Image (cartoon, helix red, strand yellow):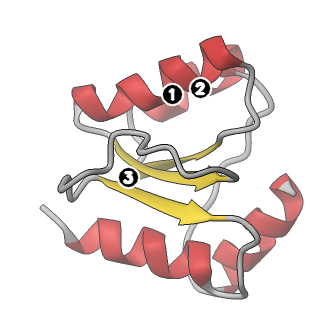
Amino acid sequence: MLRSISFALNTHGQPVEQFNDWTMATEAISRAECVILDTCLPPADLTAGLSLADRGIKLVVLAEDDKDYGSGNRQDICVLSKPLNGPDIANAVSTLRKNP
């Protein structure tokens, strides 16, 4: 799934850095315009990822359930329900980039 998401975003002109774990991603997260999280992550990793929004980092959350994941009325979190369609993630990233 990681490669597919990267390919789709690159195709839509969005630069992507891929990481398989938090340790590798820590440095890049501080300079990221947004972070894409899959709710299939281990619970501790998902909690850590969702807390990034409190540090001003925009999030796209890929969800398989109906939990809120903190999106509510926030403009810095976009929750997408799986299964995803073609440009869903690219559109979400583009929308988040436009939000202050």
Q: Position of residue 26 (x, y in %)?
A: 55, 20
Tell me, yes or no, whether the two marked residues, 1 and 2, touch with CB atoms within 8 Å: yes
Residue occupied by mark 1:
49
The secondary structure type at the circle numbered 2 is: helix
Q: Is residue 63 above or below residue 89?
A: above
The secondary structure type at the circle numbered 3 is: loop
The secondary structure type at the circle numbered 1 is: helix
Query: Disc 3 marks which amino acid?
Result: Glu
Q: Is residue 88 left or right of residue 19?
A: left
Q: Position of residue 17 (x, y in %)?
A: 66, 49
Which of 41/3 is in front? 41
Which of 87/25 is in front? 87
Residue occupied by mark 3:
33
Which of 3/49 is in front? 49
Q: Position of residue 76 (x, y in %)?
A: 26, 52
Tell me, yes or no, whether the two marked residues, 3 and 1, touch with CB atoms within 8 Å: no
Residue occupied by mark 2:
46
Q: Residue furthest front?
A: 66
Quarter of the image that includes the C terminus: bottom left
Report which quarter residue 68 is drawn in: top left
